[in-house]
Amino acid sequence: MSDYFLFVGLPYAALAIMLIGTILRYMNKGFTVSSLSTQFLEGKKLFWGSQSFHWGMMFLFFGHLIAFLFPKSVIAFNGDPVRLIILESTAFMFGLLSLFGIILLVIRRKNNKRVQIVTSKMDKVVFITLLVQIISGVWIAYFHRYGSTWFATSLTPYLWSIFAFNPDISVISTMPLAVKIHVISAFAIIGIIPFSRYMHFLVYPIAYIWRPYQKVIWNWDKNTIRIPDKWVKGVRSKNN
Amino acid sequence: MDIRSQMTMVFHMDKCIGCHTCSIACKNIWTDRKGAEYMWWNNVETKPGTGYPTKWEDQEIYQGGWEKNGETVSLKGAGKMKGLKNIFHNPNMPIIDDYYEPWTYEYEHLFEAPEGDDQPTARAKSLITGENIDIKSGPNWDDDLGGTPDYARKDPNFENLSPQEQEAMFQLEQMTLAYLPRICNHCLNPACVASCPSGAIYKRGEDGVVLINQEKCRAWRMCVTACPYKKSYYNWHTGKSEKCILCYPRLESGQAPACMHSCVGRIRYLGVMLYDADRIEAVASCDESELVDRQMEIYLDPNDPAVIKAARKNGIADSTIDAAQKSPTYKFVKEWGVALPLHPEYRTIPNLFYVPPLLPAMATVENGTYNTTTDSLWGKIDASRMPIQYLASLFSAGNGEKIKEVFRKLMTVRLHRRDKTVGDLDIKELNQALADTAMTREEADDIFRLTSLPLFDQRFVIPAAHREEAMEMLESTADVKGNTGFGFKEMPARGL
Ligand code: HEM
Ligand code: SF4
């Protein structure tokens, strides 16, 4: 019963909250959406913490995403033991990298008075969930080897079953405790995205890559505004 | 030709008395709130000096502005590649200590301290952490310290001066300083806009004011690095960047920006200039020696019928064209050519111009005596009290000729006025000066009048904002007073 609550109820609740919450916050409380950078208050220790944490996180995120989207390719890739070992050990390295990073970030937050001042309650929740997530992940990688293969065969179907609105928890409920914790805390993280600084990775500035460098905004169509027999609608900038 | 209108400014350095009224006016209206205490959208620095933030002009440290890259320009320390690569940690960003840690004093303690043997004191408390602090620097920490080893000697502009020239500036008899009031330049090629990954920063088409949309800013903090003038500030409390808004709510209601309105020395001028946006890239990427001249070309003659026609076609209102024709900045910058941009080598095409300081006395020490004879003021421009090369490093990318050109004109105006009011000059000298600078006596009078006796409406020529046409401009500014000042009604609480 509690497995149903944790592996069906929680995921759906988290996903729904995330979806609705982030949209509402983005639309109505745009001012609060920010990476809340603390570099201005402390710049040196942040370098090691933030760089290692984020780059590690990036790799792991896309790793999980690929295993989720293309499980068959991952299994095929891992067919050769050499490749399997290489993939496993790189993933493990990145896991350690982000663990190292998050530990540095936590120490920095605790020790630097200026950064403490701008640490909210939600930030603490963020760090705790991340610590649980990363430690359980590294634990699994070490004690339950070859996750890159068994994830694709057993967890991917579970995740797909969630997204197909046909939840099947038969595999997940037989998994070791560490895996369960990892999954639960992952959905918990998703659920608190709209209420925390987790929001910042959803607004990754991808459009920067293709937009022109300069940006000029007119409140009206400058070429037609003063043609007397033509009515032109003003553009209300979102800032007001 | 893509004609646009731009609010431009001229600051007359000879007139600035360094009173900081401008900074206070600005602070009171816009930045007197949490997270913004340290910000001075308007600040007045002493030159030579290290400025605010410390050594902001040293782009080896801060990597601000653009650099020439063939036929175009690229951002020095930001941009698509560098910005997204450094998004997790920005290596060239100044931190609070490069400005100063804001503080207040524990005044209540003076009243509430228990009775004791000692007088209670009001200790300095950090406005960030609330703890006692030892003040190491503060606003205008190097104010008036034009000859000191700790500040003046560390001025990055000295790089272009020979050791002798540098030494000369520290001789007791020649020691000098000038005030450099600074606000955002509302550039034509803004580095902050280009560096913003979120696209939160934009230039207003109607008047060229550069603004940061507070709802879109995500604290990727690239603008702080990219602005070579360090006029984009990070609010550590709200997690958003902020900058000078040229008091756009005031502009829209026909008022001069607060810093300009309150200026005691009346050094500030504000007016419209028309420019050709098609030429921005070519001007920004031209050879360093041509930067000033090419920038002057981008501003167009508002009396030229062809320009007027093209401006109208581009949606520029007649009232704006009219303002451009009366613009005091156009006169100083284009007609008379006595105002220069600050650090044009940053290639942002700034719209704030400075009349360089001719400083009152240009005496020299000869054989141990202080020589203040004024018989040949003209010849002494080369021996200007503030070395030409120093000023060139500030205002003309190192081209001393440009500074001399301006000085000759300013001197001609003085000679002319001396002749007119005292009449003791050798007329030949005056005529020579007028011929050398191709200036008429009428023009010299005009320069004199606009410099010394301008009326309020001559200093600030602000066209109607055409509120009726702009939805954005329909907001009542009184409604949003006390908020962050960016036009939306929400308390500026830090996000979660
Ligand atoms: C999509 C790409 C991401 C970008 C561009 C990004 C960017 C940033 C930036 C700019 C900061 C502020 C650093 C500073 O203080 O200056 C930050 C902080 C942080 N990010 Fe990310 N981030 C991303 C993804 C993530 C992910 C996936 C997570 C976790 C699941 C995460 C968790 C955090 C945390 C916990 C902090 C706070 C660090 C601290 O100040 O101690 N980020 N991020
Ligand atoms: S108010 Fe005017 S005179 Fe006083 S410091 Fe500012 S610019 Fe200079």
Image (tube, coloured by chain):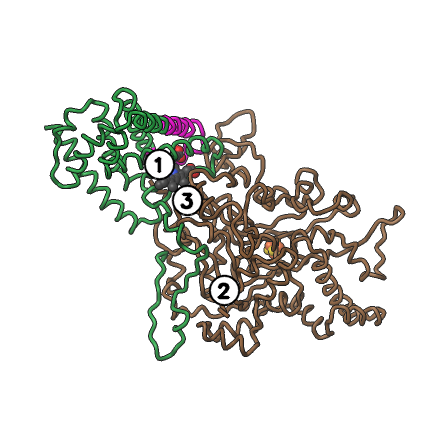
Chain colours: A green, B brown
Q: Please name whichever residue, B270 or B226, is drawn nearer the observer in this view of the structure.
A: B226
Do callouts 3 and 1 mark residues in contact (Cβ within 8 Å)?
Answer: no
Residue designated by label 2: B255
- Tag 3 or tag 2, which sits nearer the N-term? 3
Q: Is mark 3 within 8 Å of ligand 1?
A: yes
Residue designated by label 3: B219
Residue A136: which disc? none
Above or below for A169 versus B237 = above
**Labels 3, 1: front one:** 1
The chain to which mark 2 is attached is B
**Is residue B405 visible to the viewer in this orientation of the structure?**
yes
Q: Which residues are magenta?
A: A96-123
Work out which quarter of the rendered image holds the C terminus of chain B and state it.
top left
Above or below for B143 versus A233 = above
> Residue drawn 27% across and 22% down?
A145
Residue B143, image x and y in percent?
64, 45
Q: Please name whichever residue, A153 or B445, is drawn nearer the observer in this view of the structure.
A: A153
Residue designated by label 1: A58
Real-space Cα separation, disc 1 to disc 2, in angstroms: 50 Å
> Residue drawn 22% across and 32% down?
A152
Q: Is mark 1 within 8 Å of ligand 1?
A: yes
**Labels 2, 3: front one:** 3
Q: Within 10 Å of the Cα at label 1, are there few (<14), some (14-19), or many (20+) other Cα atoms?
A: few
Q: Within 10 Å of the Cα at label 2, are there few (<14), some (14-19), or many (20+) other Cα atoms?
A: some
The chain to which mark 1 is attached is A
Q: Amino acid at mark 3?
A: Ala
Dot 2: what SS? Answer: loop
Q: Quadrant of residue A149?
A: top left
**Co-location on one chain, circles 1 and 2:** no
